Amino acid sequence: MRAFLIPVLVILVGGSAALFLIVWLRARFAVGGTAMRGQLGRVLTAHGPARCIAAAHYLDQLAKREDSTAITAAWARLEMPLLEALPDCPPDYKLPLINALDACARPCRVVATARAIITMRNSLLNNGDTDPG
């Protein structure tokens, strides 16, 4: 009985360690999902102008992936915090943010999300037109 139990225990412990290592490596070096969630977390924890800058970079990367599902999921969490940060957005980052929003709206197949993205983009465009001078 003991001769059977020890090899089984070694296999279970080794298998668990290997599974843990695989999961950890995938989370650490993932190009897609987990890495993008980490970037979304950085955008959401940033404040003021930093949030606007981080959102421009994040949305640009989302647009390059052209994953409608990822864009929709990210927009659901990003829309209100980004809306709060727009008044603090540095003028140099308004154009990159406008371009990133536009690039995200194109591949998005969820009409309501695409419309919300375009509405925010248009509000940034309209604010730029009221420049005195």
Image (cartoon, helix red, strand yellow):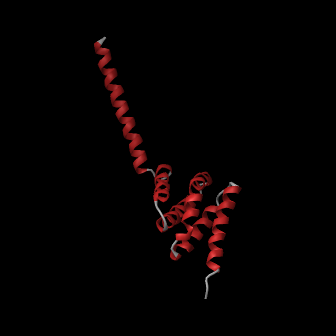
**Residue 34, image x and y in percent?**
47, 49
Left or right, 9 with reference to 73: left
**Which quadrant: the N terminus?**
top left
Count every numbered label the image shows and give the total: 0
Q: Give the quadrant of residue 98.
A: bottom right
Q: Give the quadrant of residue 123.
A: bottom right
Q: Camera-side residue: 87 or 101? A: 87
Looking at the image, is 36 positioned above or below residue 103?
A: above
Q: Camera-side residue: 42 or 8? A: 42
Looking at the image, is 16 positioned above or below residue 131?
A: above
Left or right, 14 with reference to 99: left
Left or right, 44 with reference to 122: left
**Residue 85, image x and y in percent?**
54, 65
Looking at the image, is 23 positioned above or below residue 105?
A: above
Residue that extends furthest to the bottom in the rendered view of this protein: 133
Left or right, 59 with reference to 120: left
**Residue 127, image x and y in percent?**
63, 75
